[in-house]
Image (tube, grey):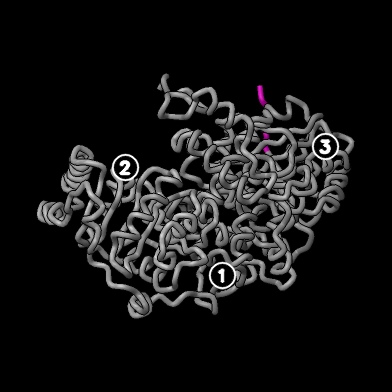
Amino acid sequence: MAREFTSVGVVGLGTMGAGIVEVFARNGVDVVAVEISEAALERGRSTLTGSTDRAVAKGKLAEADRDALLSRVDFQVGLDALHSVDLVIEAVPEHLDLKQRIFAELDRVCKPEAILATNTSSLSVTEISVATTRPNQVIGIHFFNPAPVMKLVEVVRTVVTSADVVADVEALCKRLGKVDVTISDRAGFIANALLFGYLNHAVGMFESHYATREDIDAAMKLGCGLPMGPLALMDLIGLDTAYEILDTMYRRGGRDRRHAPVPLIKQMVTAGLLGRKSGRGFYTYERPGSPVVVPDEQTPVATESALADGTRGITKVGVVGSGTMATGIIEVFAKAGYEVVSVTRGAEKSAKVFEAVKTSLNKGVVRGKLSEADRDAALGRINWSATLEHLADVDLVVEAVIEELSVKKALFASLDEICKPGVVLATTTSSLPVIDVAMATQRPADVVGLHFFNPAPIMPLVEVVQTIRTSAETTATAKAVCVALGKTGVVCGDRSGFIVNALLFPYLNDAVKMLEASYSTADDIDHAMKLGCGYPMGPFELLDVVGLDVSLAIQRELYLELREPGFAPAPLLEHLVTAGYLGRKTGRGFRDHTRR
């Protein structure tokens, strides 16, 4: 039988500490809430009452339940007030020496059987535990912010944490309505170890002027379905907190350069640009603590005239290819009112593409998203062809053929001969260098990447990839086309992975390495990222959907171009691909899909 926790103590009443207090009090547990001074105590009380009042206003908490909740909390100054609690959770700033001093004092104050827990997100629980005479009763209980909302709790055991203590804490998490994942004491645990490498990489992308803050954030939200872009998330976390976590993980985690804080982070922290809490970070906010972003000197000006300025008129579009992506792109352009010339390698291919487009449009009619008249008009705008010569009078060509450089270069060389001057030639490649394709023509200034996401009719993002030879007019025209299609176009340079894949696949590769090291299970890692970070899919779910062979190919391209040791494909990923375990399409990847 798990022990019954009738009273708990919480040390530190900042945003996280106050949230933890609320979690326990909501679940009928008496809480002693402790701070260092009366002023700090009052701030913590205000944070708690503000949170519960908002819950009442939103209809998520009855007034009587709020009053009962607040009555369970005893606000006190000083650790001596914790002498009779069953469990203490420390939630003070991420400084090892501070936490060790607090745990030494808790060891003195608390009753012998009390469990001492830290909410650290990156520091060594083991190093904290040795400040006490009861390291076997010390454990990590890492809540996620905001604690009352987020379902995940990482339960972190050290090599000496008692099995009974682990079991008691796991049972407590279930009582609180949380999903726990139990792991050993390693830098960053699961969620932060995977999250902060990705965030750091995004900051590096911004620091190098590869893409704007808005485009980086839009790319990850729209391309991956994430609740927030990485730079907005850094502002929410706090750049000072992020720096401390990254620095700790770098020093404790084998000095992986993926976790070495990008210099810009330290510079911003030094300048007081800490994110939302200071009113300015990567973005500027209405006031300190506000979530409302206001325009600043970096905010792009997007007006109709600005979008039209310097662009070429596009009325007729050619699409080359017969696969899923080509089919989706044909539909997107036709529904947007463009005349489309679809070119495939024969009448049979054209017939299949026609049926696929027609079926998709019919689904739109059935779902009430498209009228029959609009469907018929879209189909009427498409001309079917098996010869490239029919692209002689189009204004834009979108290539969506197989991802083989030799094939694309041969195609673009042919387009160069056939198409009229001034035509924008676009490739939908997701991994190959656009410049290599562009240099197969005599007009590299007219060549751009238009990376649509699958399925193209649904996904709102297009990466507009400009090479060092792409003209400003071509880029502006590509952006204007995205707007006309109802898509969000994000502009980036011609670098392996562009924005989305360059940030997404190293994170997925890190997850595979974590599994390979037997640190956690695929299920727990997926739970951690979905419940702790709000991701729509866990990394292993996503890998099985994308295809392990596709993922490996992209990761290899990233590694070959960037030569970053941390980007080297995980051996486990290579072994699974060699064994033919490619994910859902073969019935088995990281999971066996044949049994479902």
Q: Which mark is residue 283?
A: 1
Instruction: Looking at this view, name the residue that lies furthest to the top.
Output: 595
The kind of secondary structure element at disc 3 is loop
Tell me which segment is drawn in magenta.
1-6
Residue type at mark 2? Thr
Residue type at mark 1? Tyr
Q: Which mark is residue 112?
A: none
Where is 423 relative to 133, above or below? below
Residue 238 position in % (x across, y down): 65, 61
Q: Which of 460 and 329 lies nearest the eye of the viewer?
A: 329
Instruction: Residue under label 3, please give it.
Output: 111
Q: Is residue 3 magenta?
A: yes
Instruction: Residue under label 2, please give it.
Output: 324
Q: Which of 226 and 418 lies nearest the eye of the viewer?
A: 418
Question: Separation of disc 2 and disc 3 at Cα?
Answer: 65 Å
Q: Is residue 105 left or right of residue 287?
A: right
- If you read the primary sequence from the N terminus, does the residue marked by circle 2 or circle 3 appear first? 3
Image quadrant occupied by the C terminus: top left
Q: Which of 264 and 280 lies nearest the eye of the viewer?
A: 264
- Give the residue drawn at x 58%, y 47%: 558
Q: Which of 249 and 101 lies nearest the eye of the viewer?
A: 249
- If you read the primary sequence from the N terminus, does the residue marked by circle 1 or circle 3 appear first? 3
Q: Is residue 530 left or right of residue 11?
A: left
Question: Separation of disc 2 and disc 1 at Cα?
Answer: 38 Å
